[in-house]
Amino acid sequence: MKISFGAPWFLLLLLFIPCFIWCKVHTRHFYFAKIAWIRSHIPLFSLTLWLKITIFTLMVVALADPYLYDPSSNNTKRGRDLALVLDASGSMAQSGFHTKDRFKNRFEVSIELAKAFVKKRLDDNIAVVVFGTFAYTASPLTYDLNGVSYLLDMSSVGVAGESTAIGDALMQAMHTLSFGEAESKVIVLLTDGHHNAGSTSPRKAVEQAKESGIKIYTIGIGQKSDYDAGLLETIAKETGAQSYAATNAEDLAKIYAEIEVLEPSSIRSENYLNRNALAFYPMALASLLLLGLILSSRGIFSKGFTKEAV
């Protein structure tokens, strides 16, 4: 792991640190009856001075947006280009899909399990397509798995209309995958309805997927009478993949676990990195030290924050 900065130019502010020692401050006049009452101290050895410098340094480092990353992962990523295609039509608002929480609807459960699935795809380039009456790319191909999870949370039932445009959804997914460089490209289609909208038929989408060598794994949600099981089985079979049926959340979790065993292939990316942000830590420490400095200036525990030399 290595450390880098998202905004390194803020580090130039550290050049102002000498000002804490040499820059003149506004002076105030005090009158003493006896000169012996005046105690002198050397600023360089003042703990308060170094506390201020530390607080300033920590704040500058936080502004520079430090983060940890693995430099080897940028050039040796292995996995596949994988697009999650999620049905957000009106029928996904039905509840009772989760056996332990009957108030959760199908879409909410699908999002939760999709997020759990995404977190394990450390070597994959993930994209998300949401569809209903129309389809759109909610997340382009990226290694930023936290970003994908965030965008999944932003989706909701009906956001793309109430109908089910499976053909358009697959075409949109293939368009999104076209920006990736992996040899292995996979689509995971999840729906609980019948194709009844859009300008592209599922058959045409399947033909294009076969030409592009893209596998389409299909997952039917609910009872088989709720969705077009025959269509989903045909889509998966024609593209060399498998079709699944999930009558409840437990079934869907098992299906995702099975899909996780897909064979990886080489993939490269220089635009997206899984990185761990560190800005919170210096900012939190600076805040605590600043609080201590304020309390010290009010005399609450000044003995512990000032060190004077006579």
Image (cartoon, rainbow, N blue to C red):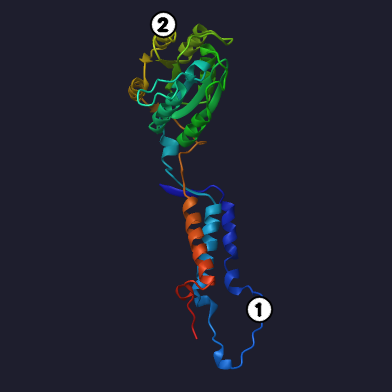
Say whether residue 43 is visible: yes
Q: Which residue is mark 1?
A: 27
Q: Residue 13's spot in the image, x, y percent? A: 59, 59
| Closer to the camera in the image, 77 or 198 | 198
Quarter of the rendering containing residue 245: top left
Left or right: residue 160 versus residue 267 is: right
Q: Which residue is mark 2?
A: 230
| Closer to the camera in the image, 217 or 268 | 217
Q: Residue 195's spot in the image, x, y percent? A: 51, 9
**Label number found at residue 170:** none
Amino acid type of the residue that numbered disc 1 sits on in the rendered structure: Thr
Neighbours of disc 2 within 10 Å: few (<14), some (14-19), many (20+): few
Quarter of the rendering containing residue 77: top left
SS class of the residue under badge 1?
Answer: loop
Amino acid type of the residue that numbered disc 2 sits on in the rendered structure: Gly
Say whether residue 266 is visible: no
SS class of the residue under badge 2?
Answer: helix
| Closer to the camera in the image, 21 or 71 | 21
Q: Residue 277's spot in the image, x, y percent? A: 47, 46
Q: Is residue 254 above or below residue 301?
A: above
User: What residue is shown at x 64% (from left), y 88% (from top)?
Assistant: 31
User: What residue is shown at x 51% (from left), y 20% (from top)?
Assistant: 88
User: What residue is shown at x 52% (from left), y 76% (from top)?
Assistant: 44
Q: Is residue 58 above or below residue 214?
A: below
Q: Is residue 198 above or below residue 84?
A: above
User: What residue is shown at x 59% (from left), y 9% (from top)?
Assistant: 199
Left or right: residue 226 versus residue 61 is: left
* Disc 2/disc 1 C-alpha distance (Å): 86 Å
CB under 8 Å between callouts 2 and 1?
no
Q: Is residue 244 above or below residue 260?
A: above
